[in-house]
Image (tube, rainbow, N blue to C red):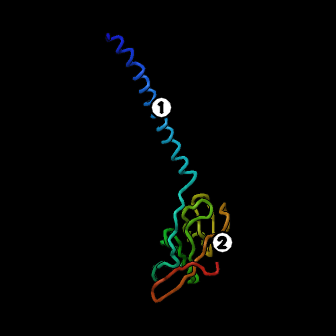
Amino acid sequence: MTDETTNAQDAPKRRHFLEIFLGASVTASLISFVYPVLRYMIPVQNAEPAADSALAGHLGDLKPNTGKIFRFGNRPALLVLTNDGKYHAMSAVCTHLNCTVQYRSDLHAVWCACHNGMYSVDGRNISGPPPRPLETYQVILKGDDIYVRRDENA
């Protein structure tokens, strides 16, 4: 057998190897582009722990007409002390696009910075794109502690 015959027989093997290698590379590239898009479009559903109550703070933490973000389970919540000395607690997750809301003392309202959504201090929609009110919580004062729990009437 001559060297030319050996090279002629190896050429189809090399070509086949290159076709497989290039096909696998293109497939891997497509998957690396498509997977993040699918993960964005179909987010993972996180199971929320069964947190029915949480310590939101202590008396004296808030001054009148201020708010405070705290953790309620695995989500943020908002505690607001109004000028008349009444506490209000609600979910701090906007019902429009799940952005975190904050209390604006200059507006005396809860505000979502994502699309300028507004809620009253009791969680009702005032303006903007949010489709429904914020989930409200019961505020319980025990000694110097402020506890918040899910509203049993909701």
Q: Nearer the viewer, mark 2 or mark 1?
A: 1
Residue hosting label 1: 23
Question: How busy is the neighbourhood of tag 2: few (under 14 within 10 Å), some, or many (20 plus)?
Answer: some
Kindly identify which numbered label has been placed on residue 144.
none
- Nearer-the-camera pick, 92 or 8: 8
- Nearer-the-camera pick, 113 or 26: 26
x, y percentage for residue 102? 54, 67
- Nearer-the-camera pick, 82 or 133: 133
Residue 108 versus residue 15 in the image, above or below: below
Residue hosting label 2: 124
- Nearer-the-camera pick, 42 or 8: 8
Q: Three-letter amino acid code at disc 1?
A: Gly
Q: Is residue 69 visible?
A: no
Q: Quadrant of the N terminus?
A: top left
The reply to whether discs 2 and 1 touch (Cβ–Cβ < 8 Å) is no
Q: Is residue 27 left or right of residue 131?
A: left
Q: Is residue 132 left or right of residue 60?
A: right
Question: How busy is the neighbourhood of tag 1: few (under 14 within 10 Å), some, or many (20 plus)?
Answer: few
Q: Three-letter amino acid code at disc 2?
A: Arg
x, y percentage for residue 77? 53, 71
Q: Is residue 75 left or right of residue 11?
A: right
Residue 59 versus residue 102 in the image, above or below: below
Q: Quadrant of the C terminus?
A: bottom right
SS class, disc 1: helix
